[in-house]
Amino acid sequence: MSDIIAYCSQVEQLLETKRATLDATSLKTLRDSFSAYQIYFENIFNILLRKGLIQEDPYKYDEKITEVNTPSDDALLESEESEKISQRLSSYHSNIEFMNNYYEFSLGFITLSRIKRIVKFAKYINWSQVTETSTSLMTRTLAKYFGKIRHGSDPLSASIINDSIVQIEKTLKQAFSTLGEITAFQKEQYKLELRQRIFSRLNLQQYVPEEKVEDIIKKVKSLFGEAMGKNVSFFPDMVKEVIREDLMPGGEELRHHALESLKIQEVRKKEEKKEDIYKSILIQAVRFLASCNLQLEDALNKVLEAQQLFESQEMTFGRRLRKWLVKLISRQEEKTLYEIEYFDVGTSANHNEKVDILEFIDETKRAIQLFSGLSSKGSQVFHKLEVSPEDKIFQLLNGNLIQLQIIYRRLNGLIVFFKTEIPKDKRGKVRGIKLELNSIKNSIVKANQKKHEYVSIKEEEEQMKRLGLKKEIS
């Protein structure tokens, strides 16, 4: 048993080194992958909503999620397809939001059980083969919906869907690769704990016959809850691996492979200019920001509908006459101001703001037009972004982040104002913008995260320069 004790010591040391590497890089990469996945999935989800191929689920935010769950992929009756597919996609979207907002991306949280859940969830739709012959019902249905959009008269939506699918494939490929690294680590950690907490108490012979393996697994299971804790899942395959590595012929070679797998492999990455890395972060931030263009347009249209309903109730003959005279004399529309209330996080207080509705509409439409161009990689706007210098991209990002936050605030304030001021018997006609606001907020958050990542790297580089040191970019 002395060789097993020495082996456990080696594994423990390698796991600590590996843990530091995973904490520093891989877990951040995993979090970024699923953040990106949410953005690109929302692009597709919102286009399907706009095209009427799926419907908003009115109970979407009533769903209480405590763990990531994969919706059903069972067969459906043709008569219930539209409703059920809408519910499944809406539930899937809620679970992506839950993962990104409430998951703790740490080795203590991303256990083997959770990895299994995450992999199943990420494979729910086969993004690498979205065809109508897929074995997955959801994938077949989406392929059918995408076909309708591609053969329609909206090339921009088709382009966004195509680009989003490509980006999702890349994102999930990275996520699966990272999950593979974490899985390998967690398996060896799990086996180490089995050795230290259970196998060390069994007094087994150096070699056990094949027919005794199942008996040992049963014995380990009987001790498992007490030794490992109630929250740790029992994996018979992991127990079997320990038996084969420690107690059966050929085990020494298997242990050697396990040690090799834990060693940090030095990988020589292709040289890349720092400027290219910085620009890449900024461009991704801009794309995250621009991904809400469809939701922004939908939210604006719903606010304008509410405004028209409000104005039709409020407009007296005298007011109509006054507006007509102002327009006749000045050849300009009379300014229409609405006073909205909003909560300022910075001051932790409520504030009032007067919004010129015509100016607001104009600013929001310009943002929608810009974001639409930035959302499509084939557009001239996106090409101009790619060839722009780093400082110009940062200015574009920063300026539009501030503007989008103001637009978000005003959209929310205006819809609340109209809902409050419109007579009760007419309020049911006002369509809510909760889903759109949530997507816009997500875009702001994701873009801000990338912006802070860029600023942090630049500040660290400047500090290293002042100290006369060179920063390595990974």
Image (tube, rainbow, N blue to C red):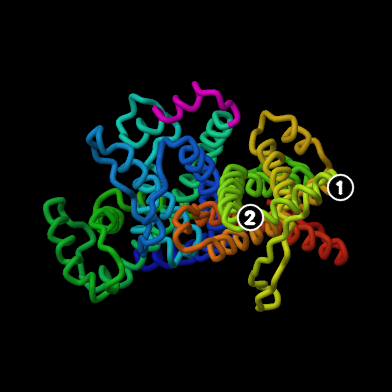
Q: Earlier in the sequence, mark 1 or mark 2?
A: 2
* Callout 2 crowding tier (Cα within 10 Å): few <14, some 14–19, many ≥20: few
- Residue 425 in sight in this render: yes
Q: Which type of secondary structure does the marked residue at label 2 adopt?
A: loop
Q: Quadrant of the N terminus?
A: bottom left
Residue 94 in the image: state x and y as whole percent: 42, 54
Does 28 appear above or below 363?
Answer: below
> What amino acid type should be assigned to the residue bearing mark 1?
Ser
Magenta residues?
143-156
Decide if residue 28 is on the left or right side of residue 447: left
Q: Residue at x 15, y 53 (%)?
A: 209
The structure residue drawn at horizontal position 36% and vertical position 64%, both measured from the top left corner, is 66
Mark 1, secondary structure of its residue: helix
Q: How many marks?
A: 2
Picture quadrant of residue 383? top right
Real-space CA distance between mark 1 and mark 2, rounded to the nearest whole angstrom? 21 Å
**In the figure, is residue 220 to the left or right of 398?**
left
Main secondary-structure element of the magenta-colored stretch = helix
> Which x, y percent locates residue 146?
45, 29
Q: Marks 1 and 2: CB-CB under 8 Å?
A: no
Q: Which mark is residue 267?
A: none
Residue at point 49% right, 21% down? Answer: 151
Report the amino acid beneath label 2.
Met
- The residue wearing badge 1 is 330
Q: Which mark is residue 315?
A: 2
Q: x, y percentage for residue 97?
A: 47, 56
> Dot 1 surroundings within 10 Å: few (below 14), some, or many (20 or more)?
few
